[in-house]
Amino acid sequence: MTTLSVVVPVYNEAATVAKLLDRVAAAPLPVAVAGLEIVVVDDSSRDGTWAALESWQPDPRGDAVAVTVVRGRHPQNRGKGAALRSGFALASGDILLVQDADLEYDPADYPKLLDPIVSGLAEVVYGSRFLGGPHRVLFFWHYLGNTFLTLLSNMFSDLNLTDMETCYKAFTREVLSRISLRSDRFGFEPEFTAKVARLGVRIYEVPISYHGRTYAEGKKIGWKDGVAAVWSILRFNLWSRR
């Protein structure tokens, strides 16, 4: 049987993190998954997120899936990529899945993400916001920016992804063991993509739902992160290949 580690990097999400973790703990899973490990890393939040994480406990599931919780905390803010690396180091599952803490991505989509892996079709799965799943209608320029970054990444990686910048990435432990991740902020997405493309592993993409936030609702990523993503695409595809 297979175990799943859901790795959740968190920064200043006190308003949503407990609700998100409730959804992760109750998420539907393929029958091959017998254990669910929730690994939460607080990246030095300043809004009460850590107190919310310390007090949160999962409700019992109505099936045979065992749920465990692992908590980690950075003494200083280091970025999403750094929080993910800390989470990966704490995780013990056969499959790892990245989950943001802001309720934009729905754990009800886990079966879509995991089925290609547990059925032996893929080693890596991307959840695409642009393959026809339901999504909140929001920012045109964000959509255009995501499309451009995915196109640029595809040009160098020779993949045909539709959503390189998606949060939802699931992959086997064996894949993780073969790459060395270095990005501290949002460069994780293009770095991970460049490095798994070079491995030659089987990559699938599946449609997911997406419930985007406005900046007033707490969205953090901005145009500076888009510029940094361009640099990361060039860096990890052309120069820093390890």
Image (spheres, helix red, strand yellow):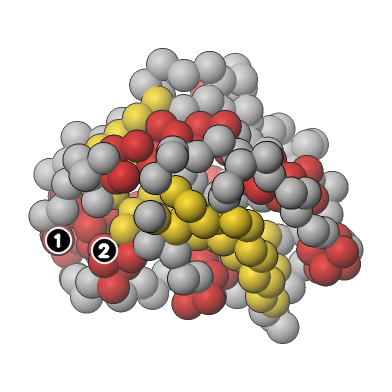
Which image quarter holds the C terminus? Answer: bottom left
Which of discs 2 and 1 lies nearer the camera? The answer is 2
Label 2 SS: helix
Pick the residue in front: 130 or 93. 93
In the picture, measured across the screen, residue 231 lies left or right of residue 241, that is right
Residue 214 image point, x, y percent: 71, 32
Residue 199 image point, x, y percent: 14, 61
- Residue ID at (53%, 76%): 90
Where is 52 relative to 160, above or below?
below
Residue that mark 2 sits on: 175
Proximity of marks 2 and 1: CB atoms separated by less than 8 Å: yes
Residue 199: numbered disc: 1
Instruction: Tell me which amino acid carries mark 2.
Output: Val
Residue 134 image point, x, y percent: 53, 17
Q: CA distance from mark 2 to mark 1?
A: 8 Å
Label 1 SS: helix
Where is 208 relative to 182, above or below?
above
Asked whether the viewer can see residue 3, the reply is yes
In the picture, measured across the screen, residue 115 lies left or right of residue 86, that is left
Pick the residue in front: 23 or 151. 23
Residue 217 image point, x, y percent: 78, 37
